[in-house]
Structure formats: structure tokens, C-alpha cells
Image: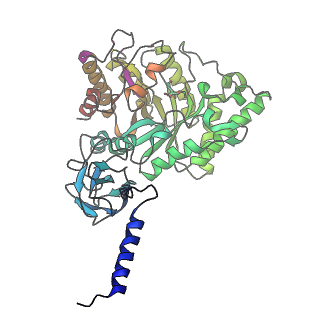
């Protein structure tokens, strides 16, 4: 065997070099390669969308072993589509089945490697094809199916109108009309003479228009919503009147053709049955109400909306007869000038009052005049005397009966007098009632159709039964 010395030398040299390279400076072994960090996956748009299914898609991460998929009807993922909560899959797609037509869904994906789970991916929105089934347990669906249908309304705040929020879902399912709870009043809109902040009001009107939901305007002139600059107005009385005219004209013009009705003057009558001594009465005189309606009508007509429905809106007229009389004397006066189309009965009621007969008598005064009736701010207190600390079953059922009663009364109105029955908010804990200092009612109350968790109450069932 011929030994090649040169070759042996070369191999020995290479071995030594490799050994040297393998040793770190302090002589120990090199640290192991670090584990790859598990990234956050990227969810991509849905594909193969049908009326009951779609494919969830995501971009594969090399380090991931599998993926966890969530599908929900709310973009906050408060609930999940059955079978699609942390559903574990490999690959880059999964078919979601058993869905409802015309409904919006949301999905997100997490990556998994061993016990390690990544953050949630971006959220993808997808709407199944087809038309949502008409569910007769939804208020507006049942009201729309009546022989003489009417709008079922709700008071809203602009921050509730985010697509996919629980308010948005309930609103689109159940209600066909909206009223701004405060953002279309004078104090948020009017920032000075001829200057305005339209942002919240625009959002509410746009939402209604985009979703085929009626918008009722509330309220052009109300003594409780006068902006500071106008309360402190230092000009003459006729200059004050011109400011009011300008405000009414600009607001009505802006929303002409976009909203169907306005409360022009709100709560002009005092609880003692006389004209409320407001800044408007003081500076503009007893004719101020008529002036305001005339300005609203003129602005609408000039903007091409000759069908704007003008309401007078007030509270407690069913139980307070002097007040009721005064309201209807104002209404009569406006009618002689053809300036009013309807009366808003607020109906901040309790489970005991007013009685059915009191409500019917009150509302009937508008009916016989041929005016539209808007039950405009309905809520029903159950703890007006602060004698309960939670919603007892007995009060819950009494409230249900009272909701049923007023819906029954409204539903029995002749077709020509029907307009809308509007509930003053969604959830009990967000109602104005428990927070009102005027009501002298500091305790809890539960006056609306949905509880704090946004679940329907018996009051909701009562409302539905009133539509039978
Ligand atoms: O419920 C409304 C509350 O959120 C507002 O802070 C308040 C002032 O703008 O107005 C409340 O709504 C009132 C309505 O506009 C007129 N009738 C009485 C309602 C309760 O105060």
C-alpha cells in the first residue's frame, strides 16, 4: 500500500482546523440555534362565498404547526359561530359551513407551535350571499308585516353606530327608525352664530340613509339644549330671533330629503299648563312657536322637500290635563296655519301610570285632528319609588304588560295616524332614567327592552305581543 504522506498531512490539518473552529473562545460548545419565534399569521380575504358558507384563508408561516380559527358574528368576538371557536387546522384554508344567508361574519387566525400560540391575526369581514331570513321575533319584522305597519324606532348615539357592533346588529335586526338621543339638538350642533359642528349628526343621518332606516330629527328648539353662546346672547331680541331662524334654516336645509321628520319645538308647555318661560318665549314673544314652524317649513320647501313632517313633542300630557289642554291649544293654532303634521307623545311612563284610558284619551286628541302620532321617547320605569334593589319578577312582568299595553294602543290607531313608536335607548344601564336628577330618582331602574348584557327582557316579549 503506497502511503501518500501529503494526503495524510492534509487530512490531519483539516481535522485540527475543524476542531479549532468548533471551539468557542472560552473553549465550550457553541450555543444551540435559537428556536424560531412564532409569528402572527396574516388572514386573507374569504373565498368561495355562498349563502351558507365561505372559505377562511390565511398565509402560511413556516414555523407554525397548525392554526386556530375563530368565526363570529360580532367583530369583538364576544360570541362564536358554533364549531368555530379555536378550531385547529393545518394548511392555509378551511371551509366554514352552516351559516345564515345575508349575514356578516368576522374571522381571525392564530398560529400554533407546540404549546406556543401566537397573537390574533387581522380580522376579516365577510357577508354571505342571499337575503337574511325575516325573523318575526324581531320587532320591526313583526311591525312591518302588520296590515297597517309603522316604524319601530330607537334613540341612538353616534358612537353606537359602528358596523359590526352589538348596537349595529340589534338596530338593523329590530328597528326601522332612529332618533338622535342628544346629538341633533342645538347645543351640540351650534357652536356660534352661523358656525356648526355637524360630525355626530351627519354620522347618524348617514347611517340611517345607508341602511334604509328612517331618521327622525330631534329637536330644533328646546329650552334644555340652548348653547352657551345663545344663552348669553347680548344682541337685541330681534337679533336673537334671527339667530334662531338662521339655525333652523341651516339645519333643516342640510338634512332636507335625508330625514323625514323633525320635532320643531320640544316641551314648550310648563307642568302647570302655561307656556314654559323659556329664553325663546322671553326674547321672541308668544308667537315664537309659530315662527319656528314657519321657518322650518320654508327651509324644507326651499330645499325641495315639500313632505317634511313637522311634530310638536312633549311629555306627561296623558296624566296632566291642564298641560294636555295647553299642548292641544298650541297644536290647534299651528293647524290653522297648516304648520304641523304630528304630535310626539314622549311617554316616559312607569309600570303604574298612565292608565290605558289616559293614554288613549290623550293620543285620540291628535287622531281626531288627523295628525300623525309619534310615541317618541318610550321607556317604562319600574322603580320610581326606589323600593326595589333589583328587577324583581313581579315588576318585570308588570313592565311587560305595560309595554304590551302601549304597543296595543298604538297598533290600533288608524293607518293615517301611524308614524313611529320609538323606544328611548337600548340597554337599561345606558338609559337616562337612573341618572336623571330631575326625576329625583337616584336608585337603579330598568326601563328599556334589553338588560345590561344586551339580552331581551320580558318587556321585549310584551312589545311583540302588542303587535298580535
Ligand atoms: O336622554 C337624553 C339624554 O341622554 C341627554 O343628555 C338629555 C339632554 O340632551 O336629553 C335626554 O333626552 C330628553 C329628550 O331629548 C327630551 N325629552 C326628555 C328626554 C330625557 O331627558
What residue is rendered at 61% in x and 40% in y?
A: 296
* Residue 392, quarter of picture: top left
What residue is rendered at 36% in x and 23% in y?
A: 360
Residue 140 sits above or below residue 348 on the image:
below
137 lies left or right of 388: left
Q: Is residue 59 visible?
A: no
Let me know if residue 245 is in the magenta part: no
Q: Position of residue 54 (x, y in %)?
A: 26, 61
77 lies left or right of 468: right
Provide the residue span drawn in magenta.
378-394
For the N terminus, the image quarter is bottom left
Count how many numbered circles sit on residues in the image. Answer: 0
Q: Position of residue 251 (x, y in %)?
A: 62, 43
* Residue 26, quarter of picture: bottom left
Q: Position of residue 437 (x, y in %)?
A: 51, 15
Q: Position of residue 89 (x, y in %)?
A: 23, 57
Amino acid at each position: 500500500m503506497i502511503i501518500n504522506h501529503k494526503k495524510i498531512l492534509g487530512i490531519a490539518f483539516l481535522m485540527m482546523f475543524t476542531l479549532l473552529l468548533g471551539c468557542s473562545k472560552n473553549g465550550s460548545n457553541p450555543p444551540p440555534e435559537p428556536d424560531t419565534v412564532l409569528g402572527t399569521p396574516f388572514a386573507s380575504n374569504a373565498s368561495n362565498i355562498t349563502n351558507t358558507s365561505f372559505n377562511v384563508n390565511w398565509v402560511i408561516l413556516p414555523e407554525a404547526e397548525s392554526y386556530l380559527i375563530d368565526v363570529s358574528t360580532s367583530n369583538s368576538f364576544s360570541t362564536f359561530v358554533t364549531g368555530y371557536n379555536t378550531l385547529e387546522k393545518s394548511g392555509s384554508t378551511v371551509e366554514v359551513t352552516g351559516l345564515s344567508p345575508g349575514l356578516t361574519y368576522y374571522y381571525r387566525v392564530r398560529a400554533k407551535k407546540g404549546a406556543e400560540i401566537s397573537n390574533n391575526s387581522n380580522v376579516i369581514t365577510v357577508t354571505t350571499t342571499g337575503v337574511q331570513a325575516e325573523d318575526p321575533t324581531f320587532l320591526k319584522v313583526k311591525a312591518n308585516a302588520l296590515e297597517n305597519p309603522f316604524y319601530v324606532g330607537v334613540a341612538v348615539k353616534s358612537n353606537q353606530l359602528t358596523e359590526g357592533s352589538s348596537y349595529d346588529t340589534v338596530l338593523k335586526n329590530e328597528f326601522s327608525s332612529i332618533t338622535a338621543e342628544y346629538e341633533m339638538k342645538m347645543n351640540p350642533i351650534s357652536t356660534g352664530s352661523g358656525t356648526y359642528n355637524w360630525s355626530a349628526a351627519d354620522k347618524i343621518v348617514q347611517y340611517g340613509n345607508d341602511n334604509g332606516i328612517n331618521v327622525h330629527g330631534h329637536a330644533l328648539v328646546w329650552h334644555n339644549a340652548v348653547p352657551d353662546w345663545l344663552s348669553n346672547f347680548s344682541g337685541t331680541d330681534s337679533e336673537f330671533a334671527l339667530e334662531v331662524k338662521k339655525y333652523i334654516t341651516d339645519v333643516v336645509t342640510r338634512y332636507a330629503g335625508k330625514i323625514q321628520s323633525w320635532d320643531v319645538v320640544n316641551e314648550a308647555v310648563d307642568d302647570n299648563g302655561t307656556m314654559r318661560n323659556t329664553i325663546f318665549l322671553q326674547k321672541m314673544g308668544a308667537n315664537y312657536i309659530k315662527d319656528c314652524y314657519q321657518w322650518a317649513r320654508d327651509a324644507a320647501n326651499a330645499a325641495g322637500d315639500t313632505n317634511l313632517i313637522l311634530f310638536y313633542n312633549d311629555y306627561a300630557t296623558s296624566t296632566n290635563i291642564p298641560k294636555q289642554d295647553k299642548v292641544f291649544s298650541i297644536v290647534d293654532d299651528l293647524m290653522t296655519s297648516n304648520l304641523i303634521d304630528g304630535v310626539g307623545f314622549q311617554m316616559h311612563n312607569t309600570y303604574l301610570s298612565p292608565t290605558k284610558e289616559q293614554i288613549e284619551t290623550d293620543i285620540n286628541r291628535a287622531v281626531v285632528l288627523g295628525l300623525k302620532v309619534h310615541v317618541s321617547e318610550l321607556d317604562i320605569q319600574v322603580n320610581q319609588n326606589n323600593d326595589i334593589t333589583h328587577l324583581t319578577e313581579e315588576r318585570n312582568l308588570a313592565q311587560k304588560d305595560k309595554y304590551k299595553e302601549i304597543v296595543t294602543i298604538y297598533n290600533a290607531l288608524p293607518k293615517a295616524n301611524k308614524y313611529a313608536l320609538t323606544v328611548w335607548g337600548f340597554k337599561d344601564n345606558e338609559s337616562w332614567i337612573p341618572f336623571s336628577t330631575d326625576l329625583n330618582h337616584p336608585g337603579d331602574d330598568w326601563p328599556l327592552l334589553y338588560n345590561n348584557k344586551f339580552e331581551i327582557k320580558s318587556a321585549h316579549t310584551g312589545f311583540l305581543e302588542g303587535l298580535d
